[in-house]
Amino acid sequence: MSEDSRKRGLGRRREPTDPEGRMTLVEHLRELRSRMIRSAWAILVGSVVAWFFYQRIFAFLTKPYLDAAKLLSSQQQVQAHLYLNGVADAFNLQVKLSVAVGAILASPIWLYELFRFIAPGMLRREKRWGALFVLASLPLFLLGVVTAYFALPRLLHALLGFTPQGLTNLTTVDDYISFLIQLVFFFGIGFMTPVLVVTLNVLGLLSAQRLRSWWRWIVFLSLVFAAVGNPTGDVITMFLFAIPQLFLMLIAYVICLFNDRRRARREQAAGFGDLPDDQVSPLNLGDETADERPSDLHEAND
């Protein structure tokens, strides 16, 4: 076998990876593409599974609306109904709902792929806390999804209750499912934000004191986030969205506060807890030789 044949049989050899984890821009883009492809395949598989269980999923998701409509009919004599308005609406609805449920089912995989894409640029300690962030984010994301579902009946009862008596509130199924998907993902992502805050604090990148100084911005941004994620646009729903987010941020602040105090006690015991950030540690002062001390600029030029 000739040398050219052996080369063709073996194919192109992969370049050795950098032991320090450094990658070129092209390698980063290839890595991002591969991670996105794996995530897309996971979502596709989850969507196919949701497609075969569509009828059960649809009945489960429309139950809060039907319960709220039944309660309004008995209390306020207000009628509310779901309907389809188009030949292709039923098919489009099934596709949209299957993809949304597939993304939720595949959330462990795309969260893992996201972490693996960021991990090469982290130190060992940062990777450990990053892995804990991913592990904590998944149950909190699912907790946000469950919270949104169980909060939905009261929210729908309050919103549909504004319908004047004598009128029938006709809501397209597509609008209702879009409302539900937006609500679910908003709560899911919102519940993950405090975990990110705690992770940054553990890594020493964000202190509780600085977080407390930002409380006005946190409240403002939470309201803005609630307004953007609010499917209806009314003020009541916006505050219903913002309150759980602010409560979780308060819990994150308490955790950061205890962690900062624990870190301060540890540094105090080590003997350098009172040093400001711009002061040199006194551990090696007095042990320098004349050759080890930095020379004067004029002496160096001479």
Image (spheres, grey):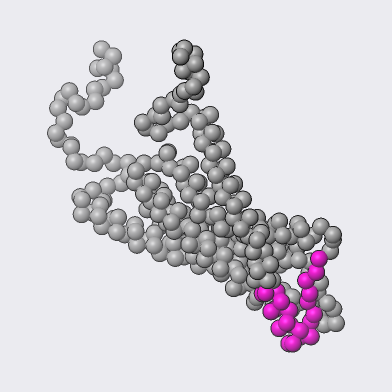
Please tell me how many numbered marks the rendered image carries. 0
Camera-side residue of 298 and 183: 183
The quarter of the displayed image where residue 293 is located:
top left
Q: Quadrant of residue 269?
A: bottom left
Foreground residue among 185 and 1? 1
Is residue 127 toward the left or the right of residue 42 in the image?
left
Q: Residue at x 56, y 50 (%)?
A: 42
- On the image, the x and y values in percent for residue 242 come to 59, 65
Residue reaching furthest front? Answer: 1
Which percent across, then down, holds residue 249?
48, 62
Report whether residue 249 is seen: no
Task: Say if residue 7 shows up in the picture.
Answer: yes
Q: Residue at x 54, y 65 (%)?
A: 144
In the rendered view of the protein, which quadrant contains the C terminus? top left
Query: Height in image: 120 above or below 112?
Result: above
Q: Is residue 105 above or below residue 60?
A: above
Residue 116: in magenta span: no
Q: Percent from the top left, x then y, of residue 32?
A: 54, 38
29 sits to left or right of 200: right
Could you tell whether 192 is left or right of 282 in the image?
Answer: right
- The correct choice, above or below, for 159 with respect to 249 in the image is below
Question: Percent position (x, y) of residue 218?
Answer: 53, 58
Q: Which stretch appears magenta?
A: 63-84
Residue extending farthest bottom: 74
Which residue is found at the position 47% from the left and 65% from the top? 250
Please tell me whether residue 65 belongs to the stretch shown in magenta.
Answer: yes
